[in-house]
Image (tube, grey):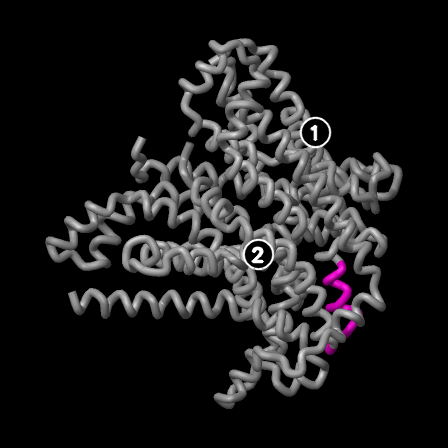
Amino acid sequence: MSRNVKEALVYLIPSIILFLVFFYWPLIQNIYLSFFSWNMVSPTMKYVGFKNFADILSSPELIKIMINTVLFIGFMLILIFVLPYFYSYILGHLIKKWNNFYRSALFLPATLSLAVASILFLWIYNPLAGPINIILSAFDITSPRWFKENYLVIFAICTIIGWKFFGYNLIIMLAAMVAVPKEMIEAAKLENASNWVIFKKIILPMTSSTAIYVFTITVVFSLQHVLVPVNMLTQGGPDQGSSNLVYIVYQYGFTFFQTGKAAAYAVITMFVYMAFLYVKNKYLEKKVYYEN
Amino acid sequence: MKTETRQELIWHVFLVVAIFLTLWPIVFMISTSLKDLNQVFESTLNPLPWPVTFDNYTTVLGNFPLFTYIWNTFFIAAMVTISKTVTSVMAAFAFVYYDFKYKESIFNGMLLTFFIPITVLIMPNYLMMAKLGLLNTPWGVMLPCLVDGMGVFLMRQTMRSVPKALLEAAVLDGAKPRQVLTKVIMPLIKPALLANSILFFINSWNEYFWPLLILQDKDTYTLPLALQMFISAEGGSEWGIAMAVATLTSLPPLILYGFCQKFIINTFMNSGVKG
């Protein structure tokens, strides 16, 4: 290891500058914007102190937004955290054949654009002529208007994200699964431990650090992925039924042109994220087993 | 032994169901794009269009500046890929080869940007691009996407796998740091490097949200943005055409994945490992 700091800086400077200018500076600027009332184009910005925050915290809209946010994250955790966890166990330890085929195929949607996924599922969920409607009508069920009903819209959008990211999270989890020594599992099997017991007693503790990583990226990124289908298919509707803590920033900033309020929402988002990461580091990481 | 194979069969059934749900939408997208209007509505579920028609594709080519969209998307993705690769490799090399004060803090500062919610960044970055006069240009899309916190992390992970002794031997032979990077490290990590670049390319190619803010002029659209037009304007009846554009948008990522899936999957399997 060389200790020539000047030389090291040469390699680091491009990244450091870009990170500061396009990530850290906007972070500060965003906080600054949240204290003003502004429409993004007018030459004058009016300082309003904490009024934007007070407005948000006292509006009934915030409750709806938070409920939606929790629902989105809840569905996503089931679809792209819990399910891939079990599937990675199957893929890593319970089958012997075709592993490579399965994982290549399951990862495939992760390479496609969310814009593609959105338009594709708009057609699949089409309540008049779409394939799901055809299948449902074979059982004499009338298809609901998936993107027009409260709560159902959140579920439908989550399936789009779930379709794209299931394989992605599966692969990350699989890496941790295959790192669990086969001998340990063989030994447990010799003592007649069931798959469920093996999962609970060996797999769960030994893969927990990766599981927490996937849990974290699911919570943090779900809402950001949701932006694409929400904007393409519902624009936050019906009646803000699919809006959430992240989309609302875009709505206020770029469709209602209330920059200050949008920035205030973004600051709140940031604090929620920071609180989440703090709680996660403080309470979850403690229970984790690290090999080194 | 018998019960074990039977049990395994059940797991295979689970997997086949997942595979079906995963692949069917893609098959459906491609097959719909090859159907004429009648088939789209008459034999919706039939995955094999007959007769196969390329009408949807020719209609799109005739009515939309498709090659412009393809070029716009490609140009942005290529520039972003080159820049992200270069900056990630350089930064990762500094972290692996040099020892300096605050090294871990700087590294964590870079990795942390990966977790900053995009909506916190969009307004200030948009205003910056507006001030620079870069709205409706590919440069405005690219500029905030020239570095990647995750990229630095993954490259560092990969470079750590190169044995220290090899680097020391090169230095003893009189290699300069730049040569250590280009002559020793890079050849050894070529597969991971390639996979990383491909992922940068695919992600940028697929990006919808940030370009949406910067590119309002239809001539500057990228493919994912162009897809939006087939939702609102066509009123939802031209599914064959919409699926044709969706298929074209998906083709480059699918081809790249087809060729390099092993490297890509390996890279992802490394990304969850704690450093």
Q: CA distance from mark 1 to mark 2?
A: 34 Å
Q: Which residues are magenta?
A: B226-237
Query: Residue A255: which quarter of the image?
Result: bottom right
Q: Is residue B235 within the magenta segment?
A: yes
On screen, residue A258 above or below B13? above
In this picture, residue A199 sits left or right of residue A255: left
The residue lying furthest to the left in this view is A191
On screen, residue B128 above or below B60? above
Q: Which residue has dot 2 on it? A: A63
Please tell me which residue is depicted at 54% across the width and 13% down the height of the picture: B175
Mark whose residue sits in front, 1 or 2 = 1
Which quarter shows the N terminus of chain B? bottom left
Residue B160 spot, x, y in % from top left: 44, 27
Q: Nearer the viewer, residue B199 or B257?
A: B257
Q: Is residue A287 within the magenta segment?
A: no
Residue B118 spot, x, y in % from top left: 63, 44
Q: Residues within 10 Å of mark 1 (few under 14, many from 20)?
A: some
Q: Secondary structure at mark 1?
A: helix
Q: Secondary structure at mark 2?
A: helix
Q: Dot 2 falls on which chain? A: A
Q: Which residue has dot 1 on it? A: A21
Instruction: Name the amino acid type tagged 1.
Output: Val
Instruction: Name the amino acid type tagged 2.
Output: Ile
Please tell me which residue is depicted at 59% across the width and 25% down the height of the picture: B90
